[in-house]
């Protein structure tokens, strides 16, 4: 016969805290519920039982109509390019000059606050990508050399596919996007022709 541990000891057995809900209050399976009843139930369900898209709509304050809901605090930052006052599409020469002038005077710094400080109606990500991929003074322009081709092929074989930023690190003045595009349009074809 086993002895019971004394009361108040760490070995004392405690009753379970959580129990299952009685079957009468359990949510019925979808196949047994009419679509109208299911939609009604879904609208009243707590947020953790709603699909992530619906939870995000509620948190961001945007519904189907696109109108912003009043009240409620959103989770995280809203996407920067969804603001009404940002330009989208092709950059103008004037915008390029403003970005170049600002970065020459103040350095790269915080991309999120740069557009406002530089007087640009663009989001920070757009400014960063424009600078990194097109406007930086140390970017190489023009065709790739045969040595560049061989180096890209060796690094691709060594590092694997989709490691373009690591490959770009070995080719100063070339961007990862430029190398990826060059691989897909020129080198891949060249390798297939070699056999």
Image (cartoon, rainbow, N blue to C red):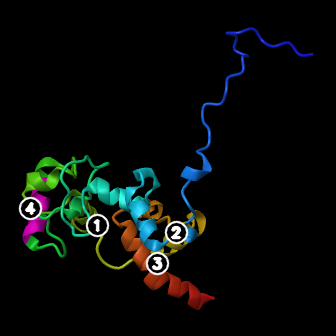
Identify the element where label 1 is drawn: helix
**In this figure, which residue is indicated by the disc labeled 4?**
98
Contact, CB < 8 Å: mark 2 with mark 3?
Answer: no
Identify the element where label 4 is drawn: helix
Q: Residues within 10 Å of mark 3 (few under 14, many from 20)?
A: some
Q: Which residues are magenta?
A: 94-103
Q: Is residue 125 above or below residue 76?
A: below
Q: CA distance from mark 4 to mark 3?
A: 33 Å
Report the predominant secondary structure element of the magenta stretch. helix
Between 18 and 80, the one nearer to me in the picture = 18
**In this figure, which residue is indicated by the disc labeled 1?**
133
Residue 97 rendering spot, x and y as whole percentages: 9, 65
- Give the quarter of the figure containing the C terminus: bottom right
Between disc 2 and disc 3, whose residue precedes? Answer: 2
Contact, CB < 8 Å: mark 2 with mark 4?
Answer: no
Single out the residue that lies furthest toward the bottom: 193
Q: Residues within 10 Å of mark 1 (few under 14, many from 20)?
A: some
Residue 105 rendering spot, x and y as whole percentages: 10, 50
Contact, CB < 8 Å: mark 3 with mark 1?
Answer: no
Between disc 2 and disc 4, whose residue precedes? Answer: 2
Q: CA distance from mark 1 to mark 4?
A: 16 Å
Q: CA distance from mark 2 to mark 4?
A: 60 Å
Lateral position of residue 32 relative to residue 176, left or right: right
Q: Is residue 121 above or below residue 12?
A: below
Between circles 2 and 4, the one closer to the viewer is: 2
Query: Where is residue 6, by image quadrant?
Result: top right
Between 85 and 75, the one nearer to me in the picture = 75
**In this figure, which residue is indicated by the disc labeled 2?**
33
Residue 187 rendering spot, x and y as whole percentages: 49, 81
**In this figure, which residue is indicated by the disc labeled 3?**
183
Residue 107 rendering spot, x and y as whole percentages: 18, 49
Q: CA distance from mark 2 to mark 3?
A: 54 Å
């Amino acid at each position: 016969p086993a002895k019971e541990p004394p009361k108040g000891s760490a070995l004392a057995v405690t009753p379970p805290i959580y129990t299952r809900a009685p079957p009468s209050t359990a949510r019925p399976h979808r196949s047994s519920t009419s679509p109208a009843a299911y939609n009604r139930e879904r609208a009243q369900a707590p947020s953790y039982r709603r699909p992530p898209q619906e939870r995000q709509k509620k948190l961001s304050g945007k519904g189907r109509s696109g109108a912003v809901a009043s009240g409620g605090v959103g989770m995280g930052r809203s996407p920067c390019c969804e603001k009404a006052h940002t330009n989208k599409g092709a950059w103008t020469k004037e915008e390029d000059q403003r970005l170049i002038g600002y970065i020459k005077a103040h350095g790269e710094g915080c991309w999120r606050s740069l557009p406002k400080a530089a007087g640009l109606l663009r989001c920070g990500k757009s400014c960063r990508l424009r600078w990194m991929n097109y406007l930086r003074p140390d970017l190489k322009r023009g065709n790739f050399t045969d040595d560049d081709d061989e180096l890209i092929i060796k690094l691709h074989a060594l590092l694997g596919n989709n490691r373009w930023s690591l490959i770009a690190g070995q080719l100063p003045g070339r961007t990862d996007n430029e190398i990826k595009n060059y691989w897909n349009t020129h080198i891949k074809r060249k390798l297939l022709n070699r056999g």
